[in-house]
Image (spheres, rainbow, N blue to C red):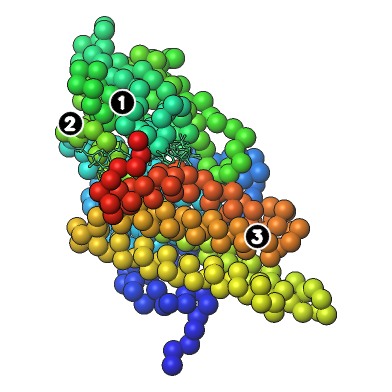
Amino acid sequence: PAKFQWEDPLNNQSLYTEEELAIQETARSYCQEQLLPRVLDAYRNEHYPREILTEMGELGLLGATIQGYGCAGVSTVASGLITREVERVDSGYRSGMSVQSSLVMGPIHEFGTQEQKDRWLEKLGQGKLVGCFGLTEPNHGSDPGSLETTAKPHPSKEGYYSLSGAKTWITNSPIADIAVVWAKLQETGKIRGFVIERDQCPPGTFETPALKNKNGLRASVTGMIQLDECPVPKENMFPEVEGLKGPFACLNSARLGISWGVMGALEDALDRARTYALERKQFKNNPLAKYQLVQKKLTDASTDTAYGLLAAYQVSRLKDEGKAAPEMINMIKRQNCDRALINTRHLQEIFGGNAVSDEYHIGRHVANLFVTQTYEGQSDIHALVIGRAITGLQAFV
Ligand code: TGC
Ligand code: FAD
């Protein structure tokens, strides 16, 4: 019989192509050699080195599924494997990358005019420009359909809209060169997407103050977007897409990426907890790993990782075949984030008091994974989307 491998209990690796495995290896080397050595300092100081996006761009990790514009044009599985390797180091690094790839390059590629694509995609893919995605507002998080940011014809500039409103909890906003912002067009009351270029905005019309002193995701940068009659050229609006399906189409792809990513964070937590449990001895010089309660924690984490990766693989292949229903993504985003958080929290106990030291990395994963369970739709919201699909009944309102 085949030998059981604890690092890959269900032999998920056998499902990936040679090319996908090579891409994963490239991503893993970069993440372990370049990102891991920086993460503790970054997390302590809430510092996100902007050059990380340039480094990722050079390796072809940004917008990796996009064909053309200098992007790698790889499968959704390969892109998921990249995400998994980045998040094995830190969810914040994955966040910065996901926003750039799925939430900024994604909508420009899917909804942009040819001119918009030519103008921004290649530079975003190289990490020469940084983007952010503004949907959430101070008064509207789970319910973005009620957003209040407005776009109306500019009173004094012909050919421009004037955007006013506030977005909050926006990854990358303080360092962004461009922002994809979702606002209601006053003429129709419908949600539309706009690309705002920081260097084209008069002073005081586009401000992006950082949100500091976070309890989680401290290695990524988060801020607000404050728009005060910000002039945006009409040609910077996505021409066709209207309503929530614009932002949600991008979120489908970002949420699928998170489903892969959080499994990477859980794998790292499991690896560290196993090593610790084998080395640390208590009661008659036995390693912690010998005790049944400890073994159960390791087994639960290992099982949920293997199942979560299988599910992410299946939905990714279906997506590339055009057969993935959005609710499949709601399901795996919820399940993988919930299981990553719960298991990591249990693995944390194995470290005893040392779990409190950041040098053991486990507390950082736990704090980060709370955020992954919350953003891009909090888990209970995903449960209600799936419940609606099962029953046909709307439970949000
Ligand atoms: P609902 O009536 O369900 O839908 C309105 C319109 O949108 C369409 N739609 C979708 N289209 C594509 N994919 C999906 N997944 C879609 N879900 C909905 C739908 O067909 C409809 O189209 P149409 O043509 O009929 O207008 O809208 P609702 O207002 O009832 O929505 C409720 C709910 C809960 C599903 C939704 O609002 C929701 O998912 N809320 C969660 C909010 C969220 O995810 N925010 C994310 C902010 S971005 C972020 O967090 C980035 S963090 C990134 C990082 O740092 O890594
Ligand atoms: P609320 O909507 O106020 O929800 C609070 C709680 O109530 C949740 O548990 C929710 O599940 C529950 N709840 C709400 N409504 C219902 C209901 N009908 N039934 C049952 N329970 C309900 N947004 C962006 O647009 N772009 C970004 O780049 C971005 N990055 C982020 C980065 C970080 C670090 C964080 C923390 C958030 C980020 N977000 C971003 C925002 C994120 O998407 C929202 O925080 C999330 O959608 C939840 O919204 P909320 O915080 O307003 O919570």
Check disc 3 and report the residue beneath it: 348
Can you name the residue that lies furthest to the bottom here? 1
Q: CA distance from mark 2 to mark 1?
A: 14 Å
Mark 2 vs mark 3, foreground winner is: 3
| 391 and 356: which is toward the camera | 391
| Residue type, label 1 | Ala
| 93 and 170: which is toward the camera | 170
| 48 and 345: which is toward the camera | 345
Determine whether the residue tagged by mark 2 lies in a helix, strand or loop: loop
Circle nearer the N terminus (2, 1): 1
Q: 217 above or below 343?
A: above
Determine whether the residue tagged by mark 3 lies in a helix, strand or loop: helix
Circle nearer the N terminus (2, 3): 2
Q: Give the left or right position of residue 324, taking residue 56 as reference.
A: left
Check disc 2 and report the residue beneath it: 239
Check disc 1 and report the residue beneath it: 183
Q: Residue at x 47, y 75 (%)?
A: 8
| Residue type, label 3 | Gln
How busy is the neighbourhood of tag 1: few (under 14 within 10 Å), some, or many (20 plus)? many
How busy is the neighbourhood of tag 2: few (under 14 within 10 Å), some, or many (20 plus)? some
Discs 1, 3 touching: Cβ within 8 Å: no
State the image coordinates of residue 62 (x, y, percent, origin top left): 37, 49
Q: Give the left or right position of residue 341, taking residue 233 as reference.
A: right
State the image coordinates of residue 45 (x, y, percent, origin top left): 64, 40
State the image coordinates of residue 313 (x, y, percent, origin top left): 34, 65
Circle nearer the N terminus (1, 3): 1
